[in-house]
Amino acid sequence: MIKLTFYSKDKKRIFGTREVKIPPNGLVIGRGKNCNIQVEDPTVSRQHAVIYFKNNNYYIKDLKSENGTFVNDKKVDETILKPNDVIGIGKYLVEFTILSPETVGVSPSILYPIIAIFGVLAILLIVFFAKPTSTLTGLLKIDSDPQGAEVLINNEKKGITPISIPLKEGSYEIVVKKDSYEDFEKKDINIEKNKTLDLGVIKLTPLPSYATLEVETTPTNAKLYINGEEKGLTPYTVDKLKPGEYEIKITKSGYEDYKDKITLKDNENKTMKILLSKISVTPTPTTSYGSLSLDSDPSGADVYVDNKKIGKTPINSYKLEVGTYTLKISLTGYNDYISKVTISSNSTKNLGKIKLLAKGYGRVIFDLGENFADVVFHISDSNNKERKFKDKLDNKGKFEPIDIEVGNYSYDLETKEKITGIFEIKEGFITIIKNTSEEPTKIPYYNYKP
């Protein structure tokens, strides 16, 4: 006779024990109803393995199961079993124990008729010699849902449900056991003589079904959270999880958080292999600076950069980030000077001295070319012919800007054939005379680039 003790994979939980004698054709273990030991586990085949006794040894043989049979963590096809060997079948570990040696010798086909003959003789002798006595027994009837549960009376095994058990008058304790179900216990069962006590159908309560989750990450040693609760560092296995939905979160310094929702089923063994993504670090751009210097004529004018006042002229090496800015120079009684200025890295933009244009004035510039080099010119008021200005062009036919009050003017050039022309002075504008035969050009004075 042998004993098989069924454990969970971590051996922290015992599902039950079976003490059985090996049948002549072997003890078949599997999920099918015709097996000697029925195991309710979808990972177990209908006929998974058989234990048999031969040549004074116990053997186990895999019956071509889908998920294999293991002995002491090694997959086997057929091997000898030794006391305390651990068999792996589906989600169970089964400890093998020898309680008493198996009977070996006479063939059952010969032995059974002999036993039957002696049994009949024994009964006849008992009937012949026994004295008449009153019946002191009652009957206990037990069934279960599902059937096939083991019944113990005062810790003594009596059989499998459904069952009727004759018992002497008295009080008893019964236990009904079945794999994957909670034990049913009932005390103080009173049996009366010549009466039947029918306990009816005992509804057995299934044991809670659990799932197992194994989490592996690359790299390892990441923190695992399940439903917000920290579990440990990966790789990590969580067992005894009830079927249902779970929120998974994995964190590791330097890597993006991993989040997911999973659903676990009854008796599911789920493995998650997760590749964590590194956090991409954008380098902080370094700021480059340059500087701005300028003066004005007259000085003391307010200077603005992008509408922010930075001081009064003269401005010396004012620090600015690299870029293009709008510069404004403002002084009471003068037209604002507005211009774009670009600052380069590690250099100073020096605008020199900027001549401001008084209000009520415009500016005239002669730029006639080398054909008019060193020619004397006159500027007169067109209305009263009053001469306003006399000077000589330079060797390139140019003359520095001349600030004149707003109005209409004429000019003449002292060439062989006297050349004359007219032009208008507009406030805040520069009038540029480049060709004596064309209309002079007018632009805002701050837009002029010599």
Image (cartoon, rainbow, N blue to C red):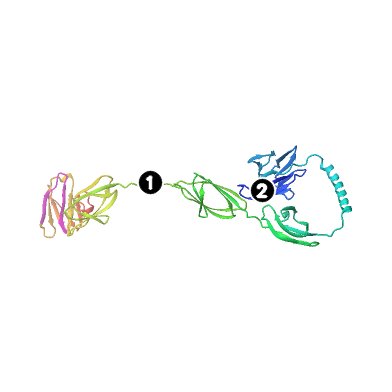
Front in this rendered view, residue 54 or 241: 54
Q: Residue at 66%, 48% (x, y): give it.
A: 6
- Amino acid bearing label 2: Phe
Q: Position of residue 244 (x, y in %)?
A: 58, 55
* Coordinates of residue 44 in the picture (x, y in percent): 67, 47
Q: Is residue 234 left or right of residue 433?
A: right
Above or below residue 406? Residue 8 is above
Q: Nearer the viewer, residue 257 or 14?
A: 14
Q: Mark 1, mark 2: which one is toward the viewer?
A: 2
**How many numbered tags mark residues here?**
2
What mark, if any, has residue 193 been given in the picture? Answer: none
- The residue wearing badge 1 is 283
Question: What residue type is disc 1 on?
Answer: Pro
Quarter that holds the N terminus: top right
For the stretch drawn in magenta, what is the main secondary structure? strand
Image position, residue 113 (x, y; %): 86, 45
Q: Is residue 115 visible?
A: yes
Left or right: residue 70 compared with residue 161: left
The part of the image, by quadrant, that contains residue 148 is bottom right
Q: Position of residue 170 (x, y in %)?
A: 75, 60
Magenta segment:
387-409
Label 2 Cα neighbours within 10 Å, binned few <14 / some 14-19 / many ≥20: many
401 in magenta: yes
Q: Secondary structure at mark 1?
A: loop
Q: Residue at x 71, y 61 (%)?
A: 188
Which residue does the numbered mark 2 point to in the structure image? 6
Position of residue 329 in the picture relative to residue 177 (left or right): left
Q: Is residue 92 left or right of residue 151?
A: left
Q: Mark 2 falls on what kind of element?
A: strand
Q: Quick check: can you spot residue 78?
A: no
